[in-house]
Amino acid sequence: MFRLLGNKKLIFLLVCLILFIALMGLTFGERKSLTWPEKFLKDTVSFTQGLFYKPAGIIAGFFENMGMLSDVYEENLALKKKLSDYALDTIRLNILEEQVGRLEEALLFSERQKQANRYIWHFAEVISASPDPFDQTININLGEKDGIRENMAVATVDGLIGIVRNVAPFSSSVQLISAIDYRVDTTKAIAATTKENEESFGMIERYTEENFLEMNKIESTDSIEVGDTVLTSGYGEVFPKGIVIGTVVSRGVSDSGITHKAMIKPAANLTGAKLRQVFVIEVPEP
């Protein structure tokens, strides 16, 4: 019986070997078409691959798109940062160009003034302005260490703006001429004349609500007229002679009926928050 089983196994192996050799012959031989088992097997494998390939492609495409979105987001952030930096650089450049322009103008003005008179013009930066509308003062970055003293006149390239009131070692407070009021003891009137006629004379004693300087004590026979340029006369030894104050816009009889008064439009901007660079005028000792 065991011999019969062994013969059956041998016969089975021989049959399998014959089938394998036949299959190999069919496979490696030159053929024009596939056999039906090969076709079946190929279609089965292709169908199975298709079942897995499409979902795998969708998932892979999803993650690839997510990666691309992440790259686009990072590129947008980098672009926004570059645009922001460019805008800041443009603003800084504009500010620097404006500062250079003001400094060049101030330098030319200072040189012209040196040639015109013997005053010393100390260039100063405005570091702050009082926010109180009733306190018409600004602070500058020059003080006692720079030779600044109280009652020195202060001007811009356009004209007179004020007088030094308080001095610290490294800074000073400037009272603007917009604070002038003859009814207040802490302000000083300005003795004035005109560029057109040095014989003209008046006292600037008040700054009006209409933003004009009121010039009083003008003789009725004085030749001052609308359009004249008003200058400091130098009388009183507070404001140096020859500093531009403004332009006459009107003239009429004063309230007393004896003398005349004139309204002066200031040549310089008297808004503290808009002032950037000023000159402190030093008159050398004789």
Image: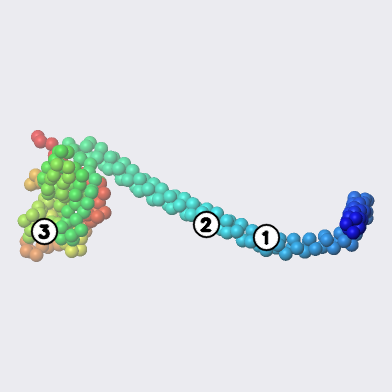
x%, y% of residue 233?
Answer: 13, 47
- Using the numbered discs, state the Cα–Cα distance from disc 1 to disc 2 in whole angstroms: 24 Å
| Contact (Cβ within 8 Å) of mark 3 with mark 2 | no
Frontmost residue, 71 versus 222: 71
Element type at mark 1? helix
- How many numbered badges does the structure rendering display? 3
Q: Alpha-carbon distance for marks 3 and 1?
A: 87 Å
Q: Position of residue 148 (x, y in %)?
A: 14, 41
Q: Nearer the viewer, residue 107 or 25?
A: 25
Residue count near mark 3 (Cα–Cα under 10 Å), binned few <14, some 14–19, many ≥20: some
Q: Are marks 1 and 2 in contact (CB under 8 Å)?
A: no
Amino acid at pointer 2: Tyr
Tell whether 37 sits left or right of 247.
right
The residue indicated by pointer 3 is 181
User: What numbered label is drawn on residue 57?
Assistant: 1
Please state the horizontal and vertical placement of residue 213, each as a whole percent of the image. 17, 57
Residue 246: horizontal and vertical position, in percent?
21, 53
Q: Residue at x 39, y 46 (%)?
A: 93
